[in-house]
Image: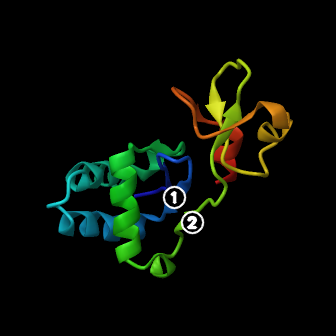
C-alpha cells in the first residue's frame, strides 16, 4: 500500500508522525490497552489511517482522550524504538485577530505563524481551528 507517514494532531497542538509499520505496532498496543476508556476508539482511528495512508496527507485531529491513549501506547512502545515517530515540541498557538480560514500553528518555521505580532499571539489551538497548511507541510 503506497503512502508515507501519518500525522496525528494531539489535543494540545503537538503533532505525532508515525510510519506505516509503526502504525501497526501502535494499533496492537492500543488493543492491549482496551480496558482503558478511549483505547478502542483510538485503535479504530489508527486502523483507518493505517489502511488508507495514501489519503492522509493532512494531520488527523484527535480528542483529548484519544491523544492521551495514543501518547500512552507510544510511550509503552518506547518512542525511541519507533522509526519515524516525531513529536513537535512547539506548543500550538494562534492569533487573537480574526482570520479566514481560522488556523493554529505548531511550528516555529511557519512563515504564516511568524507574521503574528507578539501581542496577538495566543497559546493553544483555539476553537474550531485547523492546523495551518504551512505547518502541516513542515511536518
Mark 1, residue position: 16
Front-most of residues 2 and 62? 62
Q: Residue at x 48, y 49 (%)?
A: 10
Disc number placed over residue 34 in the picture, else none:
none
Residue 121 sits in which quadrant? top right
x and y percentages locating residue 61 in the rendered image? 45, 42
Whether residue 31 is situated above or below residue 110 in the rendered picture: below
Position above or below: 10 against 18: above
Q: Which residue is mark 2?
A: 86
Question: Is 139 positioned to the left or the right of 116 in the image?
Answer: left
Residue drawn where x is 52% and y is 48% of the image: 12
Q: CA distance from mark 2 to mark 1?
A: 6 Å
Q: Secondary structure at mark 1?
A: strand
Quadrant where the C terminus is found in the figure = bottom right
Kindly tell me whether residue 4 is visible in this rendering: no
Horizontal side of residue 128 vs 1, given as left or right: right
Mark nearer the N terminus (2 vs 1): 1
**x 71%, y 18%: residue:** 98
The percent coordinates of residue 27 (x first, y second) are 29, 63
Amino acid at each position: 500500500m503506497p503512502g508515507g507517514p501519518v500525522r496525528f494532531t494531539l489535543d494540545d497542538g503537538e503533532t505525532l508522525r508515525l510510519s506505516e509499520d509503526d502504525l501497526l505496532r501502535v494499533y496492537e498496543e492500543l488493543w492491549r490497552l482496551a480496558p482503558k476508556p478511549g483505547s478502542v476508539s483510538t485503535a479504530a482511528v489508527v486502523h483507518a489511517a493505517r489502511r488508507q495512508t495514501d489519503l492522509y496527507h493532512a494531520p488527523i485531529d484527535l480528542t483529548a482522550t484519544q491523544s492521551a491513549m495514543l501518547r500512552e501506547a507510544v510511550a509503552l512502545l518506547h518512542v525511541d524504538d519507533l522509526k519515524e515517530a516525531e513529536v513537535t515540541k512547539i506548543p500550538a498557538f494562534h492569533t487573537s485577530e480574526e482570520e479566514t480560514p481560522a488556523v493554529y500553528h505548531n511550528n516555529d518555521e511557519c512563515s504564516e505563524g511568524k507574521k503574528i505580532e507578539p501581542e496577538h499571539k495566543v497559546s493553544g489551538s483555539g476553537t474550531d481551528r485547523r492546523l495551518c497548511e504551512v505547518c502541516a507541510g513542515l511536518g
